[in-house]
Amino acid sequence: MKADSNFVSLVIPTIGRETLALTKAAIKSQTRPPDELIVIIDKYRRGPCWARNEGIAKAKGDLIAFIDDDCVPGKDWLERMIVAMDKYDAAMVSSHYTETDPFLNEIRRRRKFPVSTQINPAGFVGTGGNIIYRRASLAECFMDDGFVFNQIFGHYACEDTDLSFRLKKRGHKLVFIDNRITHLKKMSPLKFLKFQFYRGVGIGILYRIHKHSDFGEVPDKSLLWKNETNSFHIMKWIRILYKKIIGPFDVNSFSSVKYFITFWIGEKIQSLGFLYAWCKKFKYPE
């Protein structure tokens, strides 16, 4: 008999990776299994926003969890997420990854994720592939905005950051816990540079949507925002341009010069993605 009173839907968006079998096997051995498992196959590559919205539309649960098709959770992963949701009466609980790819592992360690529970953390500290939401909070976003995940982000990054910010603006409680899952993704230098471009586009879209927000916090820890507001601040822009276009300089953060150079180039590619988001005429929400 389950210890909680929730009906939990678990959604796995997939593009058909072979690792999906490992993900599903780990889900079957959970100490607290989901009440329903929904696999959304994105065979036309419409993107994570589409797949996640499809999963939400099909889900019956009052709690809706997401895991990616290249992730393997520990046996108590879902149980710990549910316990945190109930304990803190949260709208969202998130965590991050343990990377199996050496390069990605060094990047993740560089970001210094928290190791203790964080309530309403500044910026978004979790990941969309290791997260659980309360349906009622998502429904509120849908009623107000006309969508849950904003499909303007398409194949680009930051759709989960956008949603978490919108939840927080509505007064909902967001919680980060250290409940890492194993990420099986492998990242070649070329794939990383493509990811960085997409990441830059996502940050650019995020900034254009929320730059005039009067909320007292920021959607991301990027220096493109002041700490206390989202208003334009010339020194912040100078610092981020210096860091992205000339830097970074922390070569000692990486185990090899090759890794550092790949990351250094990636920062420049991310800047190009940001500029692309400013030049392209996306249809931004009013």
Image (spheres, rainbow, N blue to C red):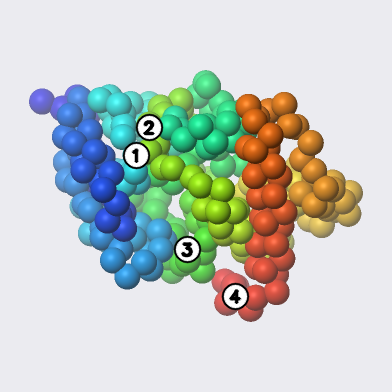
Q: Amino acid at mark 3?
A: His
* Secondary element type, mark 1: strand
Disc 2 target residue? 182
Identified at 21% across, 43% down, the residue is: 21
> Residue lying farthest top?
116
**Nearer the camera: disc 1 or disc 4:** 1
Q: CA distance from mark 4 to mark 3?
A: 13 Å
Q: Amino acid at mark 2?
A: Thr
Disc 4 target residue? 282
Disc 1 target residue? 71
**How many labels were placed on the picture?**
4
* Secondary element type, mark 2: strand
Q: Amino acid at mark 4?
A: Phe
Quadrant of the image containing the N terminus: top left
Q: Amino acid at mark 1?
A: Cys
First along the sequence among labels 1 and 3: 1
Q: CA distance from mark 1 to mark 3?
A: 19 Å
In the rendered view, tell whether residue 147 sits above or below residue 161.
below
* Secondary element type, mark 3: loop
